Amino acid sequence: MRIDILTIFPEYFNEVFDFGIIRRAREAGIVEIAVTDIRDFAHDKHRKTDDRPFGGGEGMVMKPEPIFLAVEHLLGTAEKDEYPEDAKVILLTPQGRKLDQPLVKELADKEERLVIICGRYEGVDERVSEALVTDEISIGDYVLSGGEPAAVVLADALIRLLPEALGNEASAERDTFSEGIFDFPNYTQPREFRGMEVPEVLLGGNHAEIEAWRREKALEKTRRVRKDLIDKGADE
Ligand code: ADE
């Protein structure tokens, strides 16, 4: 997979993809991540990437031209319905489809090429959504000062699902949310820590019993903390 990130703060990404699973996936050639400075495509005298909103109001709006030029540079001059290799052009915005594990999995399974635009300020000129972007994605119902942290979240969640990115394939299947509920609780050494004991069942080696206990604990916590996930599972 190749992921291009478009931003006016390229330095933001300097080291963020240099750790753990993401670093290994890059080194193994499973994913290539490239960051493009939108400002490099602002050709006016002041290299302006934003301006005041038509109709008045607070704040600044990101101008369409530098974003169009940057995406066209990356994908050739193709129109939205003819992007090469069906590349997706994603705008990160609180007004998008909410990111969840099924959406991450869909993108990881299907896409080879993603261009991710990080929105800033009060917003992005609507013509970017109309004529350039294939998908608008939000990472949750809260407002960030820009799409950059959301790009890191999206890329991280995606990359760890790419085939062979995780050393142990089984661990993605076991993840929280992969079955619509939380992961089960884990314990490691020492067996007793500050008076807290590891649950007896985990020490016994009875795999069926351990399996049942883990499922029960996962369900119990999901029910307590995120009842909506249980209700959603029941609907499906
Ligand atoms: N930009 C600002 N807030 C955001 C959010 N919640 N998700 C994605 N991009 C954003």
Image (spheres, rainbow, N blue to C red):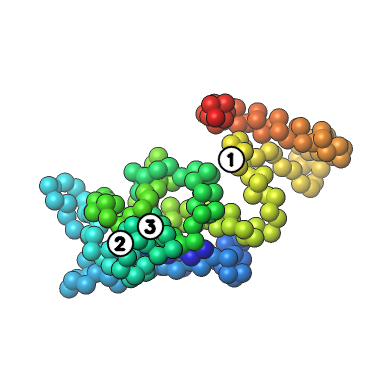
Identify residue for label 2: 79
**Residue 87 percent coordinates (x, y):** 42, 60
- Earlier in the chain: of badge 3 and badge 1, it is 3
What amino acid does circle 1 point to?
Phe
Identify residue for label 3: 89
Q: Residues within 10 Å of mark 2 (few under 14, many from 20)?
A: few
Quarter-wise, where is residue 41 in the image? bottom left
Asked whether the residues under the numbered discs 3 and 2 touch, taking CB atoms below 8 Å apart as contact, a structural biologist would say no
Please tell me which residue is depicted at 46% across the width and 45% down the height of the picture: 99
What amino acid does circle 3 point to?
Val
From the viewer's perspective, is 83 left or right of 57? right
**Residue 186 percent coordinates (x, y):** 72, 42
Q: Is mark 1 within 8 Å of ligand 1?
A: no
Cα gap from disc 1 to disc 2, whole angstroms: 36 Å
**Residue 24 percent coordinates (x, y):** 61, 66
Identify residue for label 1: 177
Of residues 69 and 20, which is closer to you in this image?
69
Q: Is mark 2 within 8 Å of ligand 1?
A: no
Please tell me which residue is depicted at 49% across the width and 61% down the height of the picture: 112
In this picture, is 220 found above or below 167?
above
Quarter-wise, where is residue 51 in the image? bottom left
- Earlier in the chain: of badge 1 and badge 2, it is 2
Cα gap from disc 3 to disc 2, whole angstroms: 11 Å
For the residue labelled by badge 2, is the local secondary structure a helix, a strand or a loop? loop
Query: The C terminus lies in which quarter of the figure?
Result: top right
For the residue labelled by badge 1, is the local secondary structure a helix, a strand or a loop? loop
Q: Which mark's residue is nearer the viewer, 3 or 2?
A: 2
What amino acid does circle 2 point to?
Glu
For the residue labelled by badge 3, is the local secondary structure a helix, a strand or a loop? strand
Please tell me which residue is depicted at 37% across the width and 62% down the height of the picture: 83
